[in-house]
Image (spheres, rainbow, N blue to C red):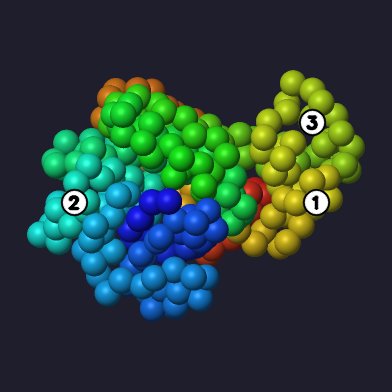
Amino acid sequence: MARIGFIGLGNMGGPMARNLLKAGHEVLGFDLVPAALEAFVAAGGKAAPSGVAAAQGAEFLITMLPAGKHVRDAYLSQSGLAAACAAGAVLVDCSTIDVATAREVAAAMPLPMLDAPVSGGTMGAENGTLTFMVGGPEAAFAKAQPILAAMGKTIVHCGAAGNGQAAKACNNMMLAINMIGACEGFALAEKLGLPHQVLFDIVSKSSGQSWAVNSYCPVPGPVPASPANRDYKPGFAAALMEKDLGLAQQAAQGCGAAAPFGAAALAVYQRFVAAGGGGTDFSGIMEMLRQG
């Protein structure tokens, strides 16, 4: 079993770290929020007084932080995270950040570093069924794969540093566009007097099908596990989707790619978040779109 430092024990990092504990690893964790650290200790983890202390002697250092600036500060400041780790350690950043920052930080590290953003939301984190999209050296990926397997079900090596973030940006842009289309379709059906279940029964087996419809239907009823049946309590919050769409647009602009529907999706989520929907599930835009 490995000695693992884990920095960032929030809604995603907390359950991920708990799954590492369940797998028998020794996990030393740190978070700026006392309640998050207390929950981690209650699950059997060991608390560290700082990020550097969590990294001390770690064979793997995992970070799950809010944004690129936090990742940059953690690794490129004078905190000495990499220096505190054991010789030959692997750094694994599971945050969702911009591609440029991921590549900048990896290039500056004296240890091999992987960018490994996740898909699957809080439910996937709790159940250990996350998808990891991993960029970085193949040898480091092979070494870290058993650790990631304790937290996720699908682990894909995407290539060089930053490619994990690139995959996440593309995936979530496509998801947001699909979800908006699904919501618009169901909103139109409502206006035309077509029941939700009837439309679902047709679309889920026809050319309009998508994960947004079949697995995460944005109206109550057809898919009992979807957030629509829980007043859109978030599995993946709209504010996070807004963030990811912004990262996708940043990446598109940086490489000269055309992404007009991605830009339109970002505008929709910006409107929804500005109206107070940031804390609801990203499928909750159904309620906004049905109002026109």
Please state which of residues 202 and 52 is positioned toward the viewer in this rendering: 52
Identify the residue shown where x is 62% and y is 39%. 179
Q: Is residue 244 left or right of residue 213?
A: left
**Mark on residue 224?**
1
Q: In the image, what residue type sits under mark 2?
A: Ala
Identify the residue shown where x is 32% and y is 49%. 60
Number of the front mark, 1 or 2 = 2
Quadrant housing residue 206: top right
Q: Does the rendering let one see residue 81?
A: no
Q: Position of residue 74 (x, y in %)?
A: 22, 57
Q: Position of residue 57 (x, y in %)?
A: 24, 57
Q: Which residue is mark 2?
A: 82
Q: In the image, what residue type sits under mark 1?
A: Pro
Please state which of residues 213 and 11 is positioned toward the viewer in this rendering: 11
Q: Earlier in the sequence, mark 1 or mark 2?
A: 2
Q: Is residue 180 left or right of residue 203?
A: left
Q: Which residue is mark 3?
A: 204
Q: In the image, what residue type sits under mark 3?
A: Ser
Identify the residue shown where x is 74% and y is 36%. 214
Q: Is residue 179 left or right of residue 152?
A: right
Looking at the image, do the residues carrying marks 2 and 3 touch, with CB atoms under 8 Å apart?
Answer: no
**Is disc 2 placed on a helix, strand or loop?**
helix
- Compute the Cα span from label 2 to label 3: 48 Å
Looking at the image, do the residues carrying marks 3 and 1 touch, with CB atoms under 8 Å apart?
Answer: no
Quadrant housing residue 280: bottom right
- Compute the Cα span from label 3 to label 1: 15 Å
Q: Residues within 10 Å of mark 2 (few under 14, many from 20)?
A: many
Q: Is residue 225 left or right of residue 17?
A: right
